[in-house]
Amino acid sequence: MYCERTGKFVMWMHLDNPTRTYAGAGVAVSDTPQGPFSFLHAKKPNRLDSRDMTLFQDTDGKVYLVHSANYNRTLYISELTDDYCDVTGLTFPVLEDQMREAPALMKRDEKYYMITSGCTGWEPNSALYAESEYLFNSWRLIDNPCEGPNYRQTFFGQSTYIFYVNGQPYLMLDHWVPHNLQGSGYSILPVTSEKGLLTVKWKDEFYGIKSRQ
């Protein structure tokens, strides 16, 4: 995430030990998105474990860390400081005891949407999206937004981030290859919102770029 106040690109990342019992977050900064990045610190945000995570910037410029905690039982939305390098202490649990991970957020027509994955290890599962009129309250799970072949397995991917190009939101999916992690890759798919319903349709190719499934 680029911070206009400091002129730095700020990266939040998951950190862990070989037994995956630490489950913390790390922060690094750089003058360019390509790096090199300088590592600042490791921590457990608001004394919570942090597993799958994403960053979300609201329309007022505030940035939030969204991460699964309590061994993936609950997602937390945590406000970041003005330099995006730490949490302020303001945090709120959402989708409590729903066992969701891989959050990806967007805001459309004054409503927040969050696409998440179930917790099935390396095995793909159906994505679900939730909606709320308030970032810190009343999130409701709605349905699987995916349409197309293998939609019940989220196209054999998992949500990771939503970004905009010319006002159009796109969802990044990561495709894990457990036996060859270096061969893992991403798909980028357009997200539509019509009459309050979120849809992610599979496209084999758009703008001359082939999707991966």
Image (tube, rainbow, N blue to C red):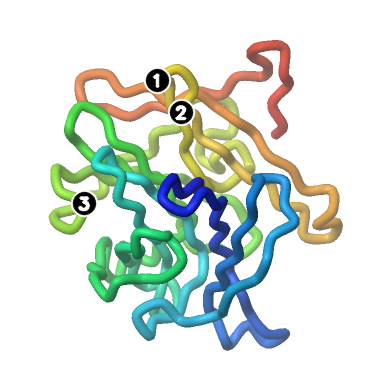
Which of these two is toward me, 125 or 107?
107
Which residue lies at the image location 51% right of the left edge and 70% below the top edge? 51
How far is the residue under mark 1 from the one under mark 3?
Answer: 20 Å
- Compared with 60, 46 (above or below) is below
Which residue lies at the image location 30% right of the left edge and 40% below the top edge? 113
**Residue 204 in the image, given as x and y percentages of width and height:** 67, 19
Q: The disc labelled 2 sits on which kind of residue?
A: Tyr
Specify which label sits upstream in the sequence, 1 or 3.
Answer: 3
Q: Residues within 10 Å of mark 3 (few under 14, many from 20)?
A: some
Which residue lies at the image location 52% right of the left edge and 34% below the top edge? 151
| Mark 2 and mark 1 residues within 8 Å of each other at the beta carbon | yes
Which residue lies at the image location 46% right of the left edge and 38% below the top edge? 162
Residue placed under numbered mark 3 in the picture: 135
| Mark 2 and mark 3 residues within 8 Å of each other at the beta carbon | no
The local secondary structure at tag 1 comes to loop
Q: The disc labelled 1 sits on which kind of residue?
A: Gly
**Residue 184 in the image, given as x and y percentages of width and height:** 77, 48
Which of these two is toward me, 32 or 77?
32
How far is the residue under mark 2 from the one under mark 1?
Answer: 6 Å
How far is the residue under mark 2 from the one under mark 3?
Answer: 19 Å
The local secondary structure at tag 3 comes to loop
Q: In which quarter of the image is residue 23?
A: bottom right
- Compared with 196, 23 (above or below) is below
For this view, does 55 lie left or right of residue 57?
A: right
Residue placed under numbered mark 1 in the picture: 167
Which of these two is toward me, 211 or 164?
164
Residue placed under numbered mark 2 in the picture: 164
Q: The disc labelled 3 sits on which kind of residue?
A: Leu
Q: Nearer the viewer, mark 1 or mark 3?
A: 1
Quarter holding the C terminus?
top right
